[in-house]
Image (cartoon, coloured by chain):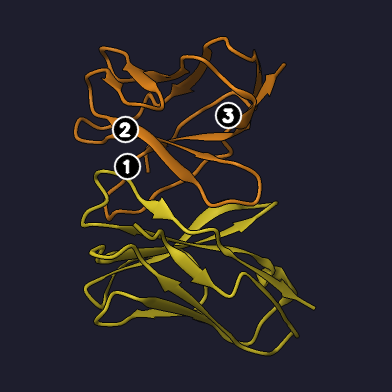
Chain colours: A orange, B yellow
Amino acid sequence: DAKTTQPTSMDCAEGRAANLPCNHSTISGNEYVYWYRQIHSQGPQYIIHGLKNNETNEMASLIITEDRKSSTLILPHATLRDTAVYYCIVRVYGNKLVFGAGTILRVKS
Amino acid sequence: KAGVTQTPRYLIKTRGQQVTLSCSPISGHRSVSWYQQTPGQGLQFLFEYFSETQRNKGNFPGRFSGRQFSNSRSEMNVSTLELGDSALYLCASSAGQGLYGYTFGSGTRLTVV
């Protein structure tokens, strides 16, 4: 399984952009990068995914480096409700999501 | 539309008992996956079902089993419960291969005493 590395925790000021990095140096050419987040006591929530192009949706933007060895999730205007654990996942064969420890994002007012 | 529904939300069982958890996926979704979340191990994949067939299985003992019905609803069963089985059990559904993301339920909190 392709492994991802994320910082343990990050702080962000409310209203500012939150940039969450992820390293996935062993990613294969056909593996997607997925981001989920989990707010306390809830199930993980899908945010965004991408293969090699940058992606944007109503929640966030995903920037993938040209060599695909790392990516950054951007929450453009973080709010207190964005405080959560953010998981960067590389899709593996067999539709199995392999979750790492994730990054605890704390948005502060 | 309705999300993924898991029942019950909370459950307390005694060691040695068995338990059955239920998951109703989003209407039209045919893939259902189960995950176990504990403070020590994090989120771990249990198994995935698609059209009533188990398509993938994680590294859990045989005490953990599941099934999927023709209406895509799924159940998971844990027999001979151990204290270490105390966890949040999460179910996720997707339309097919999960390419566009999985939708998770709120989970069932199982406590084994």
Which residue is under mark 3? A82
Horizontal relation, residue B102 to residue B100: left or right: right
* Vertical placement of residue B36 versus B53, above or below: above
Q: Chain for mark 1?
A: A
Horizontal relation, residue A37 to residue A107: left or right: left
Q: Can residue A34 be seen in this view?
A: no
Q: Distance between the residues labelled 1 and 3?
A: 24 Å
Question: Considering depth in this image, is A65 or A48 the residue closer to the camera?
Answer: A48
Q: How far apart are marks 2 and 3 (CA)?
A: 18 Å
For discs 2 and 1, the disc positioned in front in the rendered view? 2
For discs 2 and 3, the disc positioned in front in the rendered view? 3
Q: Looking at numbered disc 2 in the image, what kind of residue is underneath it?
A: His
Q: Chain for mark 3?
A: A
- The secondary element bearing badge 2 is classed as strand
Q: Where is residue A41 in the image (x, y as percent from the top left)?
A: 65, 51
Q: Do the residues labelled 2 and 1 touch (CB within 8 Å)?
A: yes
Which residue is under mark 2? A49
Which residue is under mark 1? A91
Q: Position of residue A33 (x, y in %)?
A: 33, 32
- State the residue lying farthest toward the front: B1
Pointer 2 or 3: first along the chain: 2
Horizontal relation, residue B79 to residue B34: left or right: right
Identify the residue at image location x=58%, y=39%: A101
Q: Quadrant of residue A68?
A: top left
